[in-house]
Image: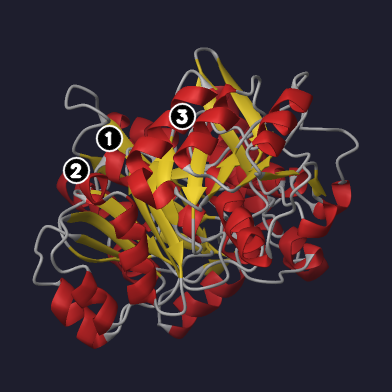
Amino acid sequence: MPKISRALISVSDKTDVVWLAGELSEMGVEIISTGGTYKLLSNEGIKATPVAEVTGFPEMLDGRVKTLHPKVHGGILADRSKPDHLRQLEYQKIPPIDLVIVNLYPFARTISRPNVTRKEAIEQIDIGGPTMVRAAAKNHASVAVVVNPARYREVIEEMKKTGGEIRQATRVALAREAFGHTAEYDAMIHAYLTGEKETGKEGGHPERLALSFRRVSELRYGENPHQSAALYSEEGSSAPSLSRAPQISGTALSFNNILDGEAAWSTVSEFEEPACVIIKHNNPCGVAVAGELSVAYTKAFDCDPVSAFGSVIAFNRKIDAETARAMADNFIEVLLAPGYRADALKVMKKKKDMRIIEIGEVADEPAAEIDFRRIRGGLLVQDYDTGHVDRESMKVVTKASPTDEQWEDLMFAWLVAKHVKSNAIVFAQGKATVGVGAGQMSRVDSVMIASEKAGGKAAGSVMASDAFFPFPDGIEKAAAAGIKAVIQPGGSLRDDEAIAACDKNDIAMVFTGQRHFRH
């Protein structure tokens, strides 16, 4: 590639662009620029030619039309190896453009703002920018394209070493990055338009699914040391996320830390009262709500102190010193909360290995995102499980009815069961778990595990099941443990047998009509 003679600069992100333009100008590169970029460079004393002077047309339609012109795109797309292309440029008086420095309107930042309007989002869909980027990337044999401000110094250093040229290998790498930039941009727009509330559910899920994620970090390894892994953040998402949350203290998060952290935050976000959730291997091993965070923690920890060792813990309130002191004797892998008081941090930072994450406030409404899981050669997509059933719509199906206290525990246990791997069984009392049975192949096995975990604490407690009991044996095992009330979806062919087992043991049972499998 010959020496860079002419550059077009049009950037939304103006990081280091003045420095870049100054370096190019000192090397004798003619600069063409647009709108706000041109004004910035001019104000900084850097000579630039406005694009309207090159095209002979002013910027139009509130800036929607600036660079969409043959005198711009002819200069970018001409193949320098073809004499006929060069003759056409000369005949049309189109100056070749050797370097295109463009990044796009901040669509992701716009749609992540609370209460952004559709009109505001649409105006941040860049047209001219992606067209120039794609044109330059296509013609990378003749033109260099830079979309990332982090590349500016690298490009300038190379030009200084080569007498103003940009090597072929660099142009190929820049073109690859440029196509990734426009692909990501289009994917964000597609996702936004696909997810708009006004589109409704009539058409189901979209025919094509475009996802846009940006790598946040390389992880030490995946679930196991022989697996490589990385963490990506979804572009345009504003929901509290481990992919964006600042880490206050401790070593870097692992793959498994992040999975468990997600499970902890999803669970604790269910509760309006001060709550604590303790997660081990992606399952709650202790959950409680209370008037004080320290009490919630103590009650959650008491559910299964053995499993709580080396766990991930989440709170839905800012952590105070009393709560920090309550956790002092426990080994905690990761701690998540909306915030931390200074006196609490002073206590917790004594544990150098504990990863402390400030994840942000619990969202008022669930994020309007989709849940997807990779399969070989495909993707499973579903809505997040945000299903909620009010107490008024539930049906008491036994002779005995739950007491007011039992109703509170049943509603609490039902929320927890939603976050336990199926087959899920949760024993609870005093709005705290006392035993959890998770991920078993049969529901009765989960009941037996919850009963064993609870021990004597099962007496007088309530039980939640994420799906119906196919046989009455689960109810019978729960009755033997001392369960006094049950909440489950219902819907089994043998519901009458489960009801009869409850009536026999003076157990109240409630049907929700809604299932919460978590595979």
* Type of amino acid at the residue the image marks with label 3: Ser
Mark 1 → mark 3, Cα distance in angstroms: 63 Å
Asked whether residue 510 is in view, the answer is: yes
Between 70 and 464, the one nearer to me in the picture: 464
Which badge, 1 or 2, comes first in the chain's sequence?
Answer: 2
Q: What element carries label 2?
A: helix
Check the image and name the residue furthest to the top: 377
Q: Name the residue under label 3.
A: 446
Residue at 49 percent across and 64 percent down: it is 430
Between 102 and 317, the one nearer to me in the picture: 317
Residue at 22 percent across and 72 percent down: it is 326
Q: Is mark 1 on a helix, strand or loop?
A: loop
Q: How crowded is mark 3: few (under 14 residues within 10 Å), some or many (20 or more)?
A: many
* 152 left or right of 399 in image: left
Residue 44 occupies quadrant:
bottom left
Q: Mark 1 points at which residue?
A: 167
The answer to whether the residue labelled 1 contacts the one labelled 2, judged by CB atoms less than 8 Å apart, is yes
Q: Which of marks 2 and 3 is in front?
A: 3
Which badge, 2 or 3, comes first in the chain's sequence?
Answer: 2
The answer to whether the residue labelled 1 contacts the one labelled 3, judged by CB atoms less than 8 Å apart, is no
Q: How crowded is mark 2: few (under 14 residues within 10 Å), some or many (20 or more)?
A: few
Between 428 and 67, the one nearer to me in the picture: 428
